[in-house]
Amino acid sequence: MEIREYWRILRAGWWIVALATAIGVAGGYAYTFFTTPQYQACARLFVTTEGGSSVGEAYQNNLFSQERVSSYAGLATSTQVAQRAVDQLQLQESAAELRSRITATPIEKTVLLDLCATDADPEVAQALTNAVAGQLTQVVQELETSQRGGNPAAGATIVDQGDVPSAPIGMGLFVTLGLGGAIGFVLGLALALLRGLVDRSIRDRPRAEDVSGRVVLGGLPVDATRPTVPVASMATMGEPLRVLRTNIRFLGGGSPPRVITITSAASGEGRTSTAIDLAAVLAEAGHTVLLVGGDLRSSTLGTRLGIEQNSGLSTVLSGEHSVEDAIQNDVFDGVSVLPAGPVPPNPSELLGSDRAQDLLQELRADYRYVIVDTPPLLDVTDGAILTALSDGTVVLARTGRTTREKLRRAIKALDGVGGIVLGVVTTFEPAGRRLRGGSPAAGGTSSETSSAAEASTAPSTEAAPSGPAHAAAVRPRPAKNDSATSSASRG
């Protein structure tokens, strides 16, 4: 995986990193707020042995004292010393509880011993330290004195009494907050990367372009309040649709595709809605548009538009009705509709017939644009058949749902039948997402610019799609298709 792929994963999961960092900071604050501050007082003891008369004896005594320091460190946390300190201070706690709050640390290569005690009260911490230190010196004296009397072989002397600590031990507030934030940030990075590596769905336009190997024509946002009639949704989806219209309009320079199939890898990716909206926005620009229900196994298009489906594409291909009788004119805003019609027993055979190819040629001559709503490519073969008969195909990829593998398979299926992939459109994009790198529509910033670009024969004022050469290639059409495109007999 390339570095830019990791960067995209982190960019898509920035909210995870931010949330984890915030939780880490909050956790650090909570730790500081709910934890009782502890104070620590320390005393220092000096370990001595009985002096010798020569340099050699003095050296040996010093080594003996260093060995004794380690022993006295263990003795400082013993039950006997702790119990004596408890009795001296008349504490309510047990010797075992006191032992857990005492530490004794020998200073390496010296005869010094640091003894510390902790408590929530700084004055109590001081009292505990001095009491334990005093009791330790007495116990050492008792142990080092021979039963026959005389001077002890070794002893411990307090050289520094414990003072009242002025500040609690441990990290300060800002250090704790910083540490919590750093831990949260690292965990957030790990979670974001893990999510990106495990998640195989198309999350953004650059990912769609990389996976498909095709240019991204645009993206359509989620419109939860989308009504049946498409033009009513222009307030929320108008500009993305106009950007898509402009990009399609200027595919191939002066000869844009006329018969366009809308397809996707699987169901539920917005094919019918996109086909309806694209037809509406093309009609808005003054073009004659026919919307065709190419999914003969489903009546989704007719149901969505609320039109009769006693006749349609299936009955025209079977010869039951003429195309003139099956087309319903001006269903919405100048868009004519050829619904799918009744479900036939042999949809694949009808779509693969010579009659289907001849029909599309006729419709191409009569309408400026023919938008065909097709079945999903990976479910049935009908969609691939229609794409092979069209001038180009727009492949939809639903954000967060379409997997990379399915998108690759869909593109491969189109290539297998010789279909021309105009580009990819991401659907159900999160609201407020702005155009990112990889989208050819980055230049389209207003509906006025889009409309002016389409009304002119000059190059588009929006950024024309750039990508693989096949995206701009349009299959040659019969000579009659180039004549009188605007003088449509149906519209």
Image: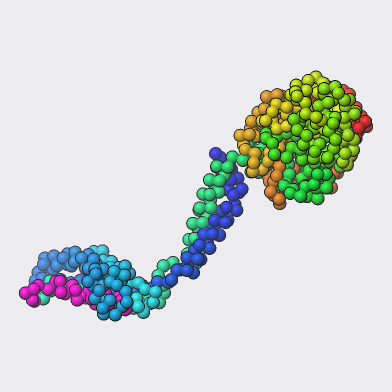
Magenta residues?
127-150
**Residue in the picture at 81% in, 23% down:** 356
* Callout count: 0
In the picture, which quadrant includes the C terminus? top right
Q: Is residue 199 left or right of residue 247?
A: left
User: Is the magenta region chiefly helix, strand or loop?
Assistant: helix
Q: Could you say which is closer to the camera, residue 162 or residue 319?
A: 319
Res 440 → quadrant: top right
Q: Measured from the top left, where is residue 407 in percent x and y?
A: 65, 34
Res 112 → quadrant: bottom left
Q: Is residue 267 left or right of residue 150?
A: right
Instruction: Kindly give the residue lying farthest to the left in the view shown.
Output: 148
Q: Is residue 341 above or below residue 446?
A: above
Q: Is residue 227 visible?
A: yes
Q: Measured from the top left, where is residue 142 in percent x and y?
A: 15, 74
Q: Measured from the top left, where is residue 292 in percent x and y?
A: 82, 32
Q: Measured from the top left, where is residue 250 in percent x and y?
A: 80, 36
Q: Is residue 164 visible?
A: no
**Residue in the picture at 17% in, 64% down:** 63
Q: Is residue 48 above or below residue 330?
A: below
